[in-house]
């Protein structure tokens, strides 16, 4: 039976997962939106998944490898709050239905850092979405990157990774590889080989991204995004940042794990 690695359909995952099928044809790569990745583990649709940190927070049976992640130290560009208004004038926040971690980060920023009161609503972001005054819209993934690099007039773009870093001094970890049942060493080895090959062959990945025509961002901006904005390897500061995030969420927003990888 083939083993399965779950991931997200966003370009920021490609340096981690692009070469997995080439390295081991007995491993299948399956794509899920972030809010479906925990289900992929519970229902055994995946042996290991690039799980949002929000799912790690709320599920004590999910454990993370301390190797690779999707994170940022400062601007992330693909996790943003878009508004016609200054953040102090926002009274409604529309949360991206595809996300959990970014939505939870938005709540921390709004309640703990911006200190604003707001009504919560949900939306499915699109390229032709309409922005109402006094409302903020969380947008993640490739569409978030498109908006943040297009510099649309009349809009304020608040980068959630940048706000978190400026307020805390720590990286923000959006996702890491999690498992429910301990993965076999061959899966871990494949992740190692795939990342090393991906990061060393970024030009080929960039050519592939441009050829699929699913993202309206220039190759120059995508390369800058993958090389400079996304941080793929864990550090001690990542774990400190995760623990701080969990502490802030536990303080009146939602109950969950106190610390990273806590049983």
Image (cartoon, helix red, strand yellow):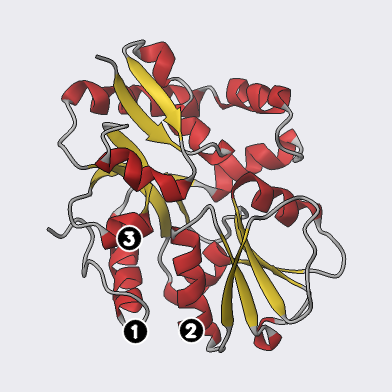
| Mark 3 or 2, nearer chain start | 2
Q: Quadrant of residue 162?
A: bottom right
User: Would residue 94 be found to the left or right of residue 85 on screen?
Assistant: left
SS at circle 3: helix
Residue 188 is marked as none
- Relative depth, front residue between 158 and 202: 158
Which residue does the image show at 49% across and 43% down from the upper left?
33
Distance from the alpha carbon under mark 2 to that under mark 1: 10 Å
Nearer to us: label 1 or label 3:
1
Distance from the alpha carbon under mark 1 to that under mark 3: 24 Å
User: Would residue 238 be found to the left or right of residue 93 on screen?
Assistant: left
Residue 105, given in percent of the width and then of the height, sits at 46, 68
Which residue does the image show at 37% across and 13% down from the upper left?
23
Label 2 Cα neighbours within 10 Å, binned few <14 / some 14-19 / many ≥20:
some
Residue 247, given in percent of the width and then of the height, sits at 29, 75
Q: In which quadrant is the N terminus drawn?
A: top left
Residue 237, given in percent of the width and then of the height, sits at 32, 60
CB within 8 Å, label 3 to label 2: no
Q: Quadrant of residue 85?
A: bottom right
Residue 111 is marked as 2
Residue 177, given in percent of the width and then of the height, sits at 32, 41
Residue 252 is marked as 1
| Mark 2 or 1, nearer chain start | 2
């Amino acid at each position: 039976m083939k083993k399965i690695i779950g991931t997200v359909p966003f370009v920021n995952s490609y340096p981690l997962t692009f070469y997995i099928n080439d390295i081991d044809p007995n491993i299948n790569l399956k794509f899920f939106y972030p809010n479906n990745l925990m289900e992929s583990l519970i229902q055994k649709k995946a042996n290991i998944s690039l799980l949002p940190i929000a799912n790690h927070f709320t599920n004590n049976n999910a454990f993370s490898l301390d190797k690779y992640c999707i994170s940022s130290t400062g601007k992330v560009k693909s996790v943003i709050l878009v508004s016609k208004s200054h953040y102090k004038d926002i009274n409604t926040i529309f949360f991206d239905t595809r996300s959990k971690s970014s939505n939870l980060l938005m709540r921390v920023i709004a309640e703990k850092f911006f200190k604003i009161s707001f009504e919560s609503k949900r939306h499915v972001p699109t390229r032709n979405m309409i922005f109402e005054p006094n409302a903020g819209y969380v947008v993640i993934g490739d569409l978030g990157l498109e908006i943040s690099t297009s510099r649309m007039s009349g809009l304020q773009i608040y980068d959630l990774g940048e706000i978190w870093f400026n307020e805390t001094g720590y990286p923000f970890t959006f996702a890491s590889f999690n498992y429910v049942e301990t993965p076999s060493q061959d899966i871990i080895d494949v992740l190692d080989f795939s990342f090393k090959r991906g990061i060393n062959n970024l030009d080929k990945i960039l050519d592939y991204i441009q050829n699929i025509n699913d993202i309206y961002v220039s190759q120059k901006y995508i390369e800058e995004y993958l090389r400079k904005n996304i941080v793929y390897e864990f550090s001690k500061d990542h774990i400190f940042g995760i623990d701080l995030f969990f502490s802030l969420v536990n303080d009146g927003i939602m109950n969950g794990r106190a610390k990273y990888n806590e049983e």
